[in-house]
Amino acid sequence: MAIAMSKILSCSVKECAYNVNDKCHTLAITVGDGSHPACDTYCYSKNQAKGGAPDVTGGVGACKTDACKFNKSFECAASGINVGPHGGHADCRTFAQR
Ligand code: SF4
Ligand code: SF4
Ligand SMILES: [Zn+2]
């Protein structure tokens, strides 16, 4: 069965190299460990150098947070996710405890 990739609807972590205008511009991110839905692809860009591709809207390539009710076999089955800051890193804000 094909799985549609969950898109990143918004990300407010402006200091990430892949963030331009609150959108994620890398093809696919990896999220989390078992219980903490951090964006593993987050890349702090001190001088605001930007990477990724401007015409790409990122999706969730894989998510390891199986405590989330949207997680199916370590993939994200949400229709889309929002990402925001948590301490010095980025978290999936669509996370919902099972
Ligand atoms: S923190 Fe994650 S979701 Fe946000 S722009 Fe960076 S790589 Fe994309
Ligand atoms: S919504 Fe849940 S399954 Fe999808 S990326 Fe976020 S934490 Fe992972
Ligand atoms: Zn966090």
Image (spheres, grey):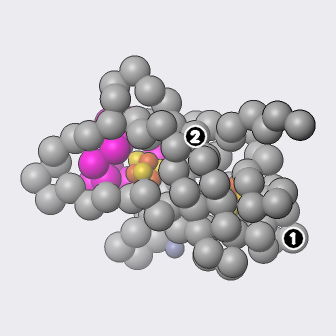
Observer-side mark, 1 or 2, equals 2
In the image, residue 95 above or below residue 6 = below
- In three-dimensional space, the C-alpha distance between marks 1 and 2, rounded to whole angstroms, equals 22 Å
In the image, residue 47 above or below residue 50 = below
From the top left corner, tell me how far across and down residue 96 is, in percent: 77, 64
Residue 92 falls within the magenta-colored stretch: no
Q: Quadrant of the C terminus?
A: bottom right
Horizontal side of 69 relative to 63 (left or right) equals right
Q: Residue at x 27, y 48 (%)?
A: 17
Callout 1, which amino acid?
Answer: Arg
**Residue corresponding to mark 1:** 98
Residue 17 falls within the magenta-colored stretch: yes
Q: Quadrant of residue 13?
A: bottom left
Give the magenta part as a residue range. 10-21
Q: Residue furthest bottom?
A: 35
**Ligand 2 within 8 A of label 1's CB?**
no
Callout 2, which amino acid?
Answer: Gly
Horizontal side of 31 relative to 43 (left or right) equals right
Q: Residue at x 79, y 47 (%)?
A: 77
Q: For the image shown, how many numbered marks are present on the structure?
A: 2
| Residue 10 visible | no
**Residue corresponding to mark 2:** 59
Query: Dot 2, how many residues are within 10 Å of its Cα: few (below 14), some (14-19), or many (20+)?
Result: many
From the top left corner, tell me how far across and down residue 47 is, in percent: 10, 53
